[in-house]
Image (spheres, grey):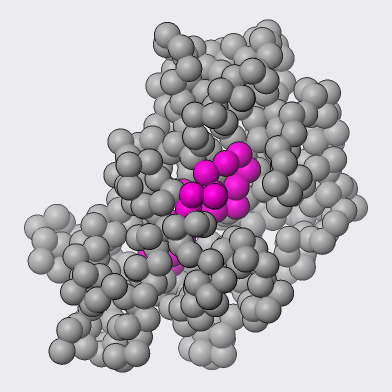
């Protein structure tokens, strides 16, 4: 992709990033310095992402990755695809902003790398999303991650349930989501909602998926190993809903009308993935998952509460950037990558965000539409 072609993409990417960030707002908790570590991860992505995607591209094509990731419990999905323009381009935005907002301050080598990264992302996204779309934002707020053959198979696995059973299942899935959120330093990286898949008159299927649950095998992060162990390392719950409207975003988050759809659940099916095979699970497995979620959450909270701010900042930034392991896992080279924060990040940005929770470039995302018209948030690439 030429720089001119990349520049045609940048205004659209900016609109999607603007929407996602401004609709979420700044993120904080009493446990992790979330906004600060996210900013650190942006700059670290600007340093490391090109080398990662270059190595991945030597093993496969973005098109193959996109096509083969349309499946239940895939590591590559709407959110992990959105990682590319969100993290890297926001880090780039901060670098340029700090250099008086001059895109010419970006070294020529980095400009070429930016074009490569945007080309990789466009080819991946357009192969993953139906109709060659690039984002959920472009797809009328639908996150359709499965092909019709998979939907037909899932429909056959759905079992009818009572309202009481629906409430119990939702409660267990919520507990698992809280555990997964905490293990990711209070981020959504292990979670994916997708749909809606129309299956009948006023009926849809939606999916809630959770990946990288600790089952006693290799822990996802150095801190992930707990005494509690899940019966499986991943789980997907397909809900059959009646009379519900569902929308999705590029963080793979679902919103519904009505907000609480528990009473609208008429059937469910549970699944786990083992390599290339997806297997249905019996509903009885939820008791073991629930015991794990509650115990593991308590263990992780106690562990994190003993850390100081620097440990939490570094862990959060590491976790965000380790999201790119979804790409290296696809081609089996994850162990060949140095996932530590770069030396430049450690020297320049970790000290800054130990003292500051907010990046001075972020307000660019909150400007008026008129201000963004000829100056997109993520900056054009200089062509001289």
In this orientation, does residue 335 appear?
yes
**Residue range highlighted in magenta:** 66-87
Residue at the right extreme of this rendering = 227
Q: Is residue 92 left or right of residue 4?
A: right
- Residue 140 picture quarter: top left
Q: Is residue 125 left or right of residue 282?
A: left
Say if the magenta span includes residue 67: yes
Residue 312 % position (x, y): 65, 69
Q: What is the quadrant of the N terminus in the image?
A: bottom left
Is residue 288 depicted above or below 189 in this figure? Answer: above
Q: Is residue 98 left or right of residue 317?
A: left
Is residue 374 depicted above or below 293 in this figure? Answer: below
- Residue 59 picture quarter: bottom right
Closest to the observer: 186 or 169? Answer: 169
Is residue 347 depicted above or below 193 in this figure? Answer: below
Q: What is the quadrant of the C terminus in the image?
A: bottom left
In this orientation, does residue 260 appear?
no
- The residue sitting at 56% across, 85% down in the picture is 342
Residue 43 % position (x, y): 45, 77
């Amino acid at each position: 992709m030429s720089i001119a072609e990349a520049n045609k993409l940048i205004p659209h990417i900016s609109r999607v990033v603007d929407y996602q960030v401004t609709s979420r707002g700044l993120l904080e908790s009493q446990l992790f310095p979330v906004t600060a570590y996210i900013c650190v991860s942006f700059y670290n992505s600007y340093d490391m992402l090109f080398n990662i995607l270059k190595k991945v591209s030597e093993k496969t094509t973005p098109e193959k990755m996109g096509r083969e990731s349309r499946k239940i419990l895939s590591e590559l999905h709407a959110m992990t695809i959105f990682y590319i323009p969100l993290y890297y381009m926001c880090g780039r935005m901060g670098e340029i902003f700090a250099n008086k907002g001059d895109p010419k301050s970006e070294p020529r080598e980095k400009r070429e790398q930016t074009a490569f990264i945007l080309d990789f992302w466009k080819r991946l996204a357009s192969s993953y999303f139906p109709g060659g779309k690039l984002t959920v934002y472009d797809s009328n707020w639908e996150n359709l991650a499965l092909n019709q053959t998979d939907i037909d198979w899932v429909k056959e696995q759905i079992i009818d349930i009572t309202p009481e059973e629906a409430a119990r299942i939702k409660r267990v899935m919520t507990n698992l989501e809280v555990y997964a959120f905490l293990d990711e330093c209070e981020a959504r990286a292990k979670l994916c909602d997708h749909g809606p898949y129309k299956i009948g008159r006023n009926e849809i299927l939606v999916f809630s998926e959770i990946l990288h649950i600790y089952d006693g095998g290799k822990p996802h992060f150095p801190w992930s190993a707990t005494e509690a162990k899940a019966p499986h390392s991943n789980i997907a719950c397909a809900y059959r809903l009646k009379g519900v409207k569902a929308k999705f975003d590029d963080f793979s988050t679902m919103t519904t009308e009505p907000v609480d759809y528990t009473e609208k659940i008429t059937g469910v099916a549970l699944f786990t993935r083992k390599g290339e095979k997806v297997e249905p699970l019996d509903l009885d497995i939820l008791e073991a998952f629930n015991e794990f979620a509650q115990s593991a959450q308590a263990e992780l909270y106690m562990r994190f509460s003993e850390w100081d701010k620097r440990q939490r900042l570094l862990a959060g930034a590491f976790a965000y950037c380790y999201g790119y392991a979804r790409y290296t896992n696809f081609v089996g080279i994850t162990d060949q990558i140095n996932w530590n924060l770069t030396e430049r990040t450690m020297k320049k940005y970790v000290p800054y965000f130990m003292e500051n929770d907010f990046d001075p470039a972020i307000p660019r995302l909150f400007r008026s539409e008129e201000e963004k018209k000829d100056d997109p948030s993520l900056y054009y690439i200089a062509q001289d």
